[in-house]
Image (cartoon, helix red, strand yellow):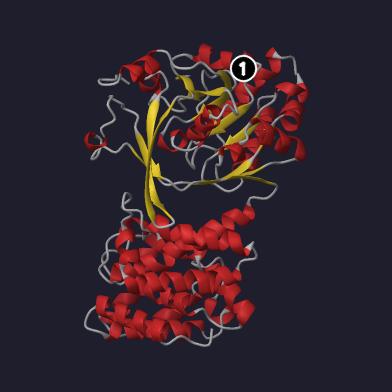
Amino acid sequence: MVNTNKEVDKELIESPKVYIEKVLQFGEGNFLRAFIVDFIDQLNEKKLFDGSVVVVQPIPQGLAETINAQKGQYTVVLRGLVNGKLVVEKRRVCSISRAINPYTDYDEYMRNMQNPNLRFIVSNTTEAGITYSETCKLTDKPPVSFPAKITALLHERFSHFKGDPTKGFIFIPCELIDDSGTRLKEIVLRLATEWELSEDFIKWVRDCNYFTNTLVDRIVTGYPKDEIESMELGYEDSLVVAGEVYHFFAIEVPNDYALRELHDKLPFHKAGLNVVLTNDVTPYKLRKVRILNGAHTMSVLAARLSGIETVGEMVKDSLFAKYIRKGIFDEIIPTLELLHEDMIGFAESVFDRFANPYIKHYLLSIALNSVAKYNARVLSTIFDYYNKFKLLPETLTLSFAALIAFYSTDEANDTEDVMSWFKDQWYRVDYVGEIRLEDLVNHFCANTNFWNGKDLTKELPGFAEKVTEHLQNIKAKATLADGMRSELERVLNNPTEA
C-alpha cells in the first residue's frame, strides 16, 4: 500500500502498530477481511483486544504475498441503507500482522504452534473446505485438506506444550455449512485415529479445544474495480474490499467456560458489533433462511417474469414491495417462534439490504436452482402456516405458481434432472396438449424427489388447486409479464380471510 498524498498515512503504513498475535486465520479472501478481521480491528481501536491475526493461505494460489507487501493493511468500504438513510464508511484495517503460505514456508507455518498467546482459529475455506480426505497424511507438508492441516497443527501444538490443557484453541469456522465446528471436530478426530496418534492427543483435542458453530451474514462484493478511481483513497491499495454496512454474527459456544472466555477476550458487544454468543444458533439460522432467503425466493421469479432485472429495482416497484412485505409480515413471521421484536427489526433490515444502491443482485443469479431453494427456504413456512391457521398463505402459494411459470421460460437454470422434468411437462402442456395446467401442477406437487419425500397433493389439502388457479391466471394474459402483474394485483387487492 503506497501512499501518494498524506505523509501521516505513509508513516502508519511503514510502521504499523504491533499487536500480540492471538488469532490464526485460514483464508485471506474478501469475506473474512470485511468481516471478522474488521471486527477485530474495531476491538483494537477501542483497546478491547490488543491482538493481531496471522493469516494462512489455505491453497497454493492466494493473496499472502500481496498482504505482506501491504504490511497486512487494507481498506474496507461499507455502503448501504440504515433505517432508509444512505451510509458510507471507509476504514483502514491494520490488524493482520502477516500472511503465511504453508506451501512455500511450511516450517514458519508450523512455528505458530509455539506461540503461547495464540488462542483462536478462524476459517473460511468455502463450503468444500470442511471435508474428509483419506489421502492426507501427517507427514504431508502441508496436508491438502483443511481438516488435515488442523490435525497436523494440533499435533504440533500438543507435542510442543506437552499436552498442556490450557494451550488448546477456540475454533470459529465461518464456512457456510450447518454445524461447521461440529463437522470439523468430527473429521479431526477421525484423522487422528486413522493416523494412529496417541490416545492422550485424541483426548486433548476432544477436551481442551472448543469448536463453535456459526452463522455469518454480510454481503461482501470484493474489490470495487469499477469504482476504485472515484473512491479517492489517496494511496494505492490492491486489497480494497467493499461490502454492505449490515452485519450479523452468531457464535454457538459448546459450554459455559468457552462462552465466558469468548465474552471476555473477544468482547464484540462492547464495540457495538451485531454479534451474539449463544448455546443454540438454530433460531438465528431459521430467521435468516425463512425471512431473508425466503423473501428472495418467494419474490425473484415473479419479479423476473414481470421483466425486472435486479433486487433493487424489485423493491422500488410498489407492487412488489407490497407483495414482499405481505409475505414477510403476514405469512412468514407468524410461523416463527422467536422474539417478535428481533424478527421485526431483522425484517426491516431486509428491506434496507434489498434496496442497497451499491449492490446489484441480479434476479437471474438468485434464480439458479430455484426448486431446491424453494424446498429449503419457503416450503416449510407454508406447512407451518397451514398447520397453525388451517389456511393456505396467499402470497407464498402464488410464489409457487410463479416458480412453475418461470420454468416454462428459457431463463430457468437448474440441475439436469429438474430441467429435463420441466421441459417434458411444459412440452406436454404447450405443444401436444396431452396434459392440462392442473395436471402439471399436480405432477409437480406429487413429485416426492423435489420435496424431501413429501407429496404436497396429500399433505397440503387444497394447495395444488390454489396453485393451479394462480397459474391459470398468470398464463391467461398475452404475456407472462402481464399475467404475473395482474395476478399480483388481484391477490394483494382482494385478500382472503387469512
User: Which amino acid type is marked by label 1?
Assistant: Met
The quarter of the displayed image where residue 434 is located: bottom left
Does 187 sit left or right of 84 as displayed?
right
Give the quadrant of the C terminus. Answer: bottom right
State the count of labels: 1
Q: Is residue 21 above or below residue 88?
A: above
- Residue located 51% across and 21% down the image: 142
Q: Nearer the viewer, residue 75 or 413?
A: 75
Q: Relative to 436, is 75 above or below?
A: above
Q: Is residue 201 visible?
A: yes
The reply to whether residue 407 is visible in this rendering is no
Instruction: Estimate the x, y position of residue 53 in percent, counting from the top left.
Output: 52, 24
Residue 484 lies in quadrant: bottom left
151 above or below 331? Answer: above
Which percent across, then down, holds residue 302? 35, 71
Q: Position of residue 476 (x, y in %)?
A: 28, 86
Q: Which residue is mark 1?
A: 113
Q: Residue at x 44, y 70 (%)?
A: 325
